[in-house]
Image (cartoon, helix red, strand yellow):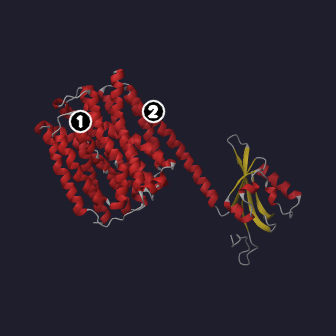
Amino acid sequence: MKKGTGQLFLQTGSLIAGFMVWVIISSLMPFIKEDIHLTSTEIAWATAVPVILGSLLRVPIGYWTNKYGARTLFSLCFIVLLIPIVILSYSSSLWMLITGGLLLGIGGAVFSVGVTSLPKYYGKTKHGFINGIYGAGNIGTAITSFLAPVLASMYGWRNTVKFYLILVLLFAILNFLLGDKRERKISLSLSDQLKEVYKNPKLWVLSLFYFVTFGSFVAFTIYLPSFLVNQFELDKVDAGIRTAGFITLATMFRPVGGWLGDKINPFLILMAVFFSLTFAGFLLAFSPSLPIYSFGCLLVAFFAGLGNGAIFKLVPLYFSKQAGIVNGFVSAMGGLGGFFPPLILTLFFNWTGHYAIGFMSLSEFSLASLVIVIWLFYQGKLDLSRKIVNHAIDGICITDMNGTIQNVNPAFSRITGYELKEVIGKTPSVLQSGEHDINFYQTMWENLLTNGYWEGFIWNKRKNNEIFKEWLTITAIRDDAGEIQNYVGMFYEVKELSEDNQIYTRNPQL
């Protein structure tokens, strides 16, 4: 078995275990509140608190993974997780739940380990799919959502929590024994990496996208068990099974989103994701019946899963040298995206008696993200056009309809000697050599106006007054109404007729 494949299995299994621990409180809350008296607001805080540390720690853990390796980070995190599990199993008050829940967040923070470590073992064309498979480790939340209520019904919720001691101890040992001791390390300082990325707008855009997609996944995961019991009066085990179904669907489509991101433009996927999340949030806002509410939740699960996979295709694409810190930051924002919604939903329900405003927030955030995705998609096309122009070996000159120069590319400057600032606002006559009479230029313009293009040989003059021969093609660019808006001239310097094939060729010095 290749080293990368072995680490993929081990780290994905570790993520499953971490996420199983991360959602213990929310999965068992219907049982906990029967033993510890809690108000609806206190329940919201107790279930949301594990997300705090699980989010904030993702940034340093992503950095430490690059510095020390996944083996060390996973092993240490699982050892530390023993502490909150013990605290929770003996909890008798809200503050013990919050204290244990805060440390329990480490189970969610380990997400940064794999998305930083695993891409080191694979080429860029597989990063989306590999991170998608690893991200499918959030199936651990589904396992706990389904299994914990069943075990609690049989053995009590405190004993159910203690069962997780065996799980985390097992994975601490597995990572220590099977983790890659020779993983490639990156030792750039945290401050230097932050300075390189925090001014990049793509960091904040990707953070917003993950805030919505993973945030909605986490929010529904921790809130659904109590919400289904309180709002629709479902049985606690039934609510757990439905929550597990939501998580499973979102998890299944995460690697699909990563795989699609490897095959097509990830922004196209995100357009579909945020359009659908906008509709789903709108649907859920109107207090629907259980079947319609279930359909809305399934929409969220399906498209949030796709979005989660596609986003982590973009991170190593834009930040190959700072993937650790950026993975940590983006995933931290996603975790925080799951912290606020339960509190907001509870707050607005206490104020208004319904959840409409809270669910509309999901719709509005998704709509804003959709607008940004569309803008980035077309901005990317413009960037590509600029790169093509700037890297072309032919000189390119763009004028307005009156022949005034608007832009030139580096090849134009290399051939003529004129920089952009020296010719912008002037006309191409600055290059005239005097070798052609007025009839030549009149014929050129007649062809441009009649046929929309002109091409041929022309003698022009460089900035240093040296005369050279070029092959020039001028094309008229028209708008949708057929009116000429610009002219684009493309040219290259030619040498004399080739003795072998009697055709003109580019100057070999260019």
Q: 334 left or right of 434?
A: left
Q: Which one is closest to the eye, mark 1 or mark 2?
A: 1
Q: Quadrant of residue 105?
A: top left
Q: Quadrant of the N terminus?
A: bottom left
- The residue where tag 2 is placed is 364
Q: Secondary structure at mark 2?
A: helix
Identified by mark 2, the residue type is Glu
Q: Is residue 210 above or below residue 361?
A: below
Q: Secondary structure at mark 1?
A: helix
In terms of sequence position, does the residue under pointer 1 or pointer 2 come before the other? 1
Distance, label 1 to label 2, CA atoms, is: 34 Å
Residue 277 marker: none
- The residue where tag 1 is placed is 95
Q: 426 left or right of 261?
A: right
Q: Is residue 469 above or below residue 57?
A: below
Residue 475 pos. (x, y %)? 72, 53
User: How many dots with numbers?
Assistant: 2
From the viewer's side, name the closer residue of 320 and 304: 320
Residue 139 pos. (x, y %)? 27, 46
User: Can see residue 310?
Assistant: no
From the viewer's side, name the closer residue of 258 and 463: 463
